[in-house]
Amino acid sequence: METFLEEVNKKINGVPLQRCYHCRKCTAGCPVASHMEYNLNKVVKMIQNGKRDEVLGSSTIWICLSCETCITRCPNQIDIARMMDVLRQMAIEEGVGAREKNVLKFHDAFLANIKMGGRINEPLMMVQYKLKSGDLFSDAVMGVEMFMKGKLSLLSPRTKDIKSVKDIFEKTKHS
Amino acid sequence: MKVSYYPGCSLHATGKEYDQSMKLVSSALGIELKEVDDWSCCGASSAHSTNFDLSIALSARNLISAEKDALDVMVPCAACFNRFKMAEHHLKADKELKTKIEDIVGTKYQGGIAIRNPIDIIFNEIGIDTLTAKVVKPLTGLKPVSYYGCLLLRPPDVCEFDNYENPVMLDKMMGAIGADVKNWSYKTDCCGGSLAISKTSIVVDMCDKLMKAAREAGANCVVTACPLCMNNLDMRPSRGLKLPVFYFTELIALAMGLDGSKETFKSHMVDPRPLLKQLQLI
């Protein structure tokens, strides 16, 4: 049976995590390290130690912004940003869900909106997110102001061949 | 020159100032735009954060559509640019993935067109000298810091854009149109991107840090090339720290004295017109 480390390495499909010598350069450059429960190199260490439940259930993987500073500065070219994508996808596929629930609900609303019209309709996407998250009132004042300034258009053009977009969603659905 | 143009979702919505000014500047600099046929969303952070195949396939659908025009594809939004470069990178590096994605999208991917951001096209194809020659109203008194953000530059071997720790193309362009560009160390720091809605407090902290640094550098505005950075910097900083934020194309259009160049300022959340009036630029 594959270890957690082997599984993650296979999915990253690049430099193996064993190459990490814990210089902590990724953590030092991470703009949201102070908001994470585990630092980036700690996550690498936890994967090496087979701490599957702790890693996939952590908030850290959902706080990562994918700013790609870590991979840019890693002396061993370990793709930490891709590692975070892999871990998030594993958490979803294995039914662990997201410790930061609203982050995943935002992604779900965003993708549902693409599936519907091919392109993002921002006001509609915000309604979809707010219904999913129950966070109905934050940003409401800002939303009204944006609407008044003409920044939010309710009827933006959609992709005409919407079937081709829906097919992509269908064929890439999580198993 | 003629290019394919992929505006992306933001440029038709909250980032419409970027689309409008991009079109003004392109026309004035002789860049002819042919919009990518029936484009769809690139998938953005939400696709790659949750489903790798989906993220590559959504971008590939657009690259395949753009390939029909056989021109370089110009992608103003830094996020779309990054997703396209990332899809190109994976499709070229992994034959098995390419076959899988072609099967998902239902068409072959050739990989024969260059994915380019307008900063690169204006800097490298049009050139600073041509740009300088077209300035009718130098932006004297405007003191921007250039904010490149993450997605144009990182990872560098994928984006192939500019010096990834200290990019300069935008700074030189702003200098060419008469602005007094301020140097700072936060050119490539993250604004908080897609967490703005779901983890707002983190993004407020990040934007506050950027605005404090811009002020310390002596800037009176920020210039960007990313609609996500624009939204966050224009909306999220705390009261008292905010500065006007511009798309670089808005400032080029203003300096070139193009008709309609003042129209986009009114939809900014931080109204830049008082500053521009004070400097007698409008």
Image (cartoon, rainbow, N blue to C red):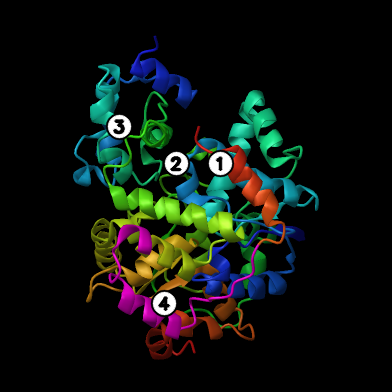
Chain bearing mark 3: A
Percent from the top left, x then y, of residue B3? 74, 58
Mark sitting on residue B142 = 4
Badge 4 marks a residue whose secondary structure is loop
Q: Which residue is mark 2?
A: B50
Q: Residues within 10 Å of mark 3 (few under 14, many from 20)?
A: many
Task: Give the left or right position of residue B30, taking residue B43 as reference.
Answer: right
Tell me where the magenta segment starts and ends, as one range.
A131-158
Q: Which residue is drawn at the image coordinates 42% and 48% (left, top)?
A: B166
Q: Which quarter of the figure is the N terminus of chain B placed in?
A: bottom right
Q: Residues within 10 Å of mark 1 (few under 14, many from 20)?
A: many
Chain bearing mark 2: B
Percent from the top left, x then y, of residue B222? 39, 68
Q: Nearer the viewer, mark 4 or mark 2?
A: 2
Front in this rendered view, residue B231 or B277: B231
Distance Cα–Cα, label 4 vs label 2: 42 Å
- Residue B74 falls in image quadrant: bottom right
Label 4 amino acid? Leu
Q: Which residue is mark 3?
A: A56
Q: Are marks 4 and 1 in contact (CB under 8 Å)?
A: no
Distance Cα–Cα, label 4 vs label 1: 43 Å
In the rendered image of this protein, does residue B122 appear above or below residue B82? Answer: below
Mark sitting on residue B54 = 1
Q: Which residue is drawn at the image coordinates 46% and 26% (left, top)?
A: A12
Task: Give the left or right position of residue A130, taking residue A164 as reference.
Answer: left
Residue B181 visible in image: no
